[in-house]
Amino acid sequence: MDSGPPFHREGLPTTISKAEKQRWRSSSSSSKSSSRPSILLAFFSCLAWLYIAGRLWQDAENRTLLANLLIKNSSQRPKVLTVEDKLMVLGCKDLERRIVETEMEITLAKSQGFLSNQLKSSSNKKFLAVIGIYTGFGNKLRRNSFRGSWMPEGDSLKKLEERGIVIRFIIGRSPNRGDSLDRNIDEENRTTKDFLILDAHEEAEEESPKKAKFFFSTAVQNWDAEFYVKVDNNINLDLEGLIELLESRQGQDSLYIGCMKSGEVVSEEGKQWYEPDWWKFGDAKSYFRHAGGSLYILSRNFAQYININSVSLKTYAHEDTSVGSWMMGIQATYIDDTRVCCGTSRQDKVCSLA
């Protein structure tokens, strides 16, 4: 037998060795395994392309729709919005109308005495004047001396009110509410019925400027009078003379009547009449013109003005200058009447120092 290598003849079947068959199988299997990732990558690439194309198509449709809306709206609305258009967009038309109505109501209230139509006094009767006599917890003896001299008592006090004159002692409450000071005043008032007790005011010497706000506010709420008179507790009144003075001024509005004065502003702390706000009165350190605190008279519309604006009215160290500062800010007619200068020696004066 021939043991040499086999001959490959053309046209005849050839013989393949085992090693060659194994090499061919391994190469074919490796080519199949490497083609699978390529197919997956191509598949996902197609999906990504379809997604991006869809989004672009949707965005293109949205842009077309917005462009059409802008073209349509531009033909119907002006290119520049006016203030009126903006107010309409913001829903402020109704607010604007209410502001105008409120301003008209304020103007009307000012023309009628700084008082809205809804604010009424508790009394329907018209009075000529309410006279308030400032007093304190330790002034009972002086109150009794007034009641026994120029100030009517009991039924005489009621008859005076029928003439249109109300007289009351003006006092606040004790810092220790409900203590013996308050109880004594309440007991005295039950007997005499001639107090106007300011429940919201704390009675103290340094609080006298605030007491003026509470007095005029409370008085105008309780009595509808043409004039409101403040009197110190060391003053003796010629009551008939004061009534005559008030009757001569009936029908005149916006009056600020008193013994007008001015004076130096005390800027040194510790001195009598020291004014903590002295620097507000300028380099001359002189008070503006104002009525002395012993006795002064305000018209109804000014008492109403104090009532409405009491929270915002500035008070200074002294009552008379505080009231004078309030009168400076409004159209007040100053009446310097020497008959109410209680420290003078005039024969026709309506008051004197007690």
Image (tube, rainbow, N blue to C red):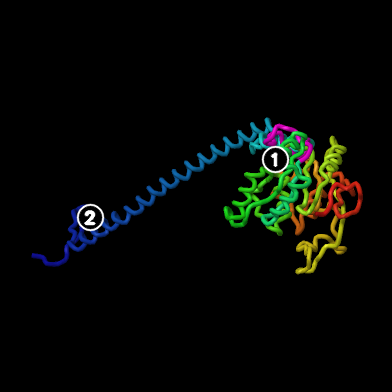
- Which residue in the structure is indicated by mark 1? 154
Residue 151 pos. (x, y %): 76, 45
Residue at left offset 78%, top offset 64%: 274
Q: Are marks 1 and 2 in contact (CB under 8 Å)?
A: no
> Where is 298 relative to 278, above or below?
above
Residue at the far front in the pictured view: 148
Q: Residues within 10 Å of mark 1 (few under 14, many from 20)?
A: few
Residue at left offset 32%, top offset 56%: 34
In this rendered view, identify the residue nearer to me: 202 or 345.
Answer: 345
Q: Which residues are magenta?
A: 112-129
Residue at the far left in the pictured view: 1
> Left or right: where does residue 247 sit relative to residue 189?
right
Looking at the rendered image, the quarter that the N terminus falls into is: bottom left
> Where is 282 relative to 94, above or below?
below
Q: Is residue 107 visible?
A: no
Q: Earlier in the sequence, mark 1 or mark 2?
A: 2
Determine which of the numbered discs, if any, sits on residue 10 in the image: 2
SS majority, magenta: loop
Looking at the rendered image, the quarter that the C terminus falls into is: bottom right
Task: Indicate the secondary structure of the residue bearing disc 1.
Answer: helix
Residue 248 placement: quadrant: top right
> Left or right: where does residue 154 sit relative to residue 288?
left
Q: Residues within 10 Å of mark 2 (few under 14, many from 20)?
A: few
> Left or right: where does residue 345 sit relative to residue 10?
right
Q: Amino acid at mark 2?
A: Glu
Q: Amino acid at mark 1?
A: Gly
Residue 350 pos. (x, y %): 85, 46
Residue 270 pos. (x, y %): 76, 69
